[in-house]
């Protein structure tokens, strides 16, 4: 008989067999808190935002940004703002579609029909997030073919996290819990991004990411209440994904890189980013440590401890050399991820051609119909 981890009795099992989105935190437990950053009402608040700039007579870019209103595609914007958004949205879109690969690797090997259905739905959602994001980028006047070309030729980045391998089934749980948890922490503030199409794309994305994070947590929860081998698998996956998840938030706010290559200061002034990389990373650590305790896994950081003075957890230093190495192409899976992506793109050429031919035929029919109506009148 296995002993549940400390605090486990205060949690109940979820009911995702019946419906998605149920809480795993004991509802009466005041200490449980939200399970991810999309749980606290911030996404709903962003969705309720009504743009009032036309009533306020705001016409110039600076006035719109100062009034915390949204820039729309028809509004004039500085070229640097447009390029920054293209860069960030495209990298985000690329991350979503490359991010399908690590977990896609496990669809055929999911241990039950229920797990397989959940995983297929999750990976499919990631394709959808890529589509919302490429569409948002296209409103900035760039073609998605061009963006894909930049991904395939290494001219644009995707998130460092997807260059790590998924070695065991528990990695699917760790990705959901930690990688999606980190992604939502970063994306909830993006629901209030100053660029309207990006902000709106993030609202639906965050709702779906919340389910992704929950299913990962629940997967690990089950493993931690399973056999010693399953518990060891969950711990091993946590050990391997913790540090790369922290690195996802990007380089530190201070230091050489922030001065020479960092975008945060300008992006915050433009209302694209609402928090700095280090602030989001700290929020993520503070939210995740109690969850690890409830799960019963140990986070692989000897320096992790509560700092009562700061009111936050202190944590150790990320291996920044590894981070930059992975970004520059030298991670365990960089080459395989791009090769797979390029091959899939080539294999999908006939689908794109068929869709374009169908759209052209529809347009032709519509204009022939309109001409016919005109001559009949
Ligand atoms: N990986 O000055 P900053 C997901 C680059 S979605 C690679 O801080 P910025 C869903 C950065 O591009 C995950 N490169 O830059 C999912 C810049 O290089 P550049 C993706 C990174 O843009 C879950 C340089 O370092 N999420 O996971 C990374 O202001 C599970 C300097 O950095 C997003 O893209 C990194 N981790 O802030 C899917 C969110 N960090 O362009 C499947 C939107 C930094 O000058 C399964 N993006 N760099 O050559 C953002 O919020 C921002 O772009 C940051 C970086 C925060 C990522």
Image: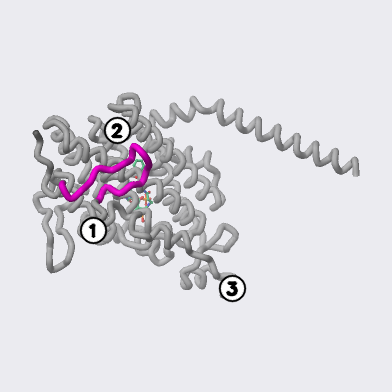
Q: Residue at x 23, y 30 (%)?
A: 168
Mark 1 touches mark 3? (CB < 8 Å): no
Range of residues picked out in magenta = 9-25
State the SS at label 3: loop
Q: Which residue is mark 1?
A: 282
Q: Is residue 66 left or right of residue 283?
A: right
Residue 55: mark in rendering = 3
Structural crowding at the residue carrying mark 2, measured as other residues with C-alpha within 10 Å and reported as few (<14), some (14–19) or many (≥20): some
In the image, is residue 316 above or below residue 143?
below
Q: Residue at x 52, y 42 (%)?
A: 144
Q: Residue at x 32, y 55 (%)?
A: 37
Query: In terms of sequence position, does the residue under pointer 1 or pointer 3 come before the other?
Result: 3
Q: Which residue is mark 2?
A: 333
Residue at mark 2 to residue at mark 1: CA–CA distance: 27 Å
Q: Quadrant of the N terminus?
A: top left
- Residue 252 showing in the rendered view: no
Residue at mark 1 to residue at mark 3: CA–CA distance: 38 Å
Q: Is residue 118 magenta?
A: no
Residue at mark 3 to residue at mark 2: CA–CA distance: 51 Å
Q: Quadrant of the C terminus?
A: top right
Q: Residue at x 15, y 35 (%)?
A: 231
Query: In terms of sequence position, does the residue under pointer 3 or pointer 2 come before the other?
Result: 3
How is the rendered protein coloured? one colour
State the SS at label 2: loop
Towards the viewer: 62 or 70: 70
């Amino acid at each position: 008989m296995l002993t549940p981890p400390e605090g486990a009795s205060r949690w109940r099992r979820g009911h995702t067999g019946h419906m998605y989105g149920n809480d795993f935190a004991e509802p009466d437990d005041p200490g449980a808190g939200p399970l991810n950053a999309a749980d606290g009402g911030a996404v709903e608040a962003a969705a309720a935002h009504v743009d009032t700039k036309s009533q306020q007579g705001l016409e110039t870019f600076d006035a719109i940004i100062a009034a915390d209103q949204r820039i729309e595609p028809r509004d004039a914007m500085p070229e640097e703002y447009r390029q920054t958004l293209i860069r960030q949205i495209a990298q985000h879109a690329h991350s979503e579609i490359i991010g399908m690969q690590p977990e896609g690797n496990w669809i055929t090997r999911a241990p039950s029909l229920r797990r397989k259905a959940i995983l297929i739905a999750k990976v499919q959602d990631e394709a959808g997030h890529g589509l919302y994001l490429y569409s948002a980028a296209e409103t900035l006047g760039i073609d998605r073919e061009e963006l894909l070309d930049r991904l395939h030729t290494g001219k644009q980045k995707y998130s460092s996290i997807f260059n790590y391998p998924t070695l065991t089934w528990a990695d699917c749980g760790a990705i959901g819990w930690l990688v999606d948890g980190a992604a939502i922490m970063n994306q909830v503030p993006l629901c209030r991004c100053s660029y309207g199409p990006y902000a709106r794309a993030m609202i639906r994305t965050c709702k779906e990411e919340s389910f992704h994070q929950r299913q990962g947590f629940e997967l690990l929860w089950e493993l931690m209440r399973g056999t010693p081998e399953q518990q060891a698998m969950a711990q091993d996956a946590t050990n391997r994904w913790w540090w790369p998840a922290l690195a996802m938030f990007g380089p530190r706010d201070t230091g050489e890189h922030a001065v020479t290559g960092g975008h945060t200061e300008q992006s915050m002034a433009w209302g694209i980013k609402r928090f700095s990389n280090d602030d989001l990373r700290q929020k993520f650590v503070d939210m995740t440590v109690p969850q690890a305790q409830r799960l019963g896994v140990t986070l692989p950081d000897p320096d992790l401890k509560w700092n009562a003075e700061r009111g936050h957890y202190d944590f150790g230093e990320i291996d920044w050399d590894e981070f930059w190495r992975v970004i520059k192409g030298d991670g365990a899976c960089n080459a395989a991820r791009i090769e797979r992506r390029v091959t899939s793109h080539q294999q999908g050429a006939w689908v794109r051609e068929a869709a374009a031919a169908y759209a052209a035929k529809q347009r032709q029919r519509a204009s022939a119909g309109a001409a016919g109506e005109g001559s009949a009148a």
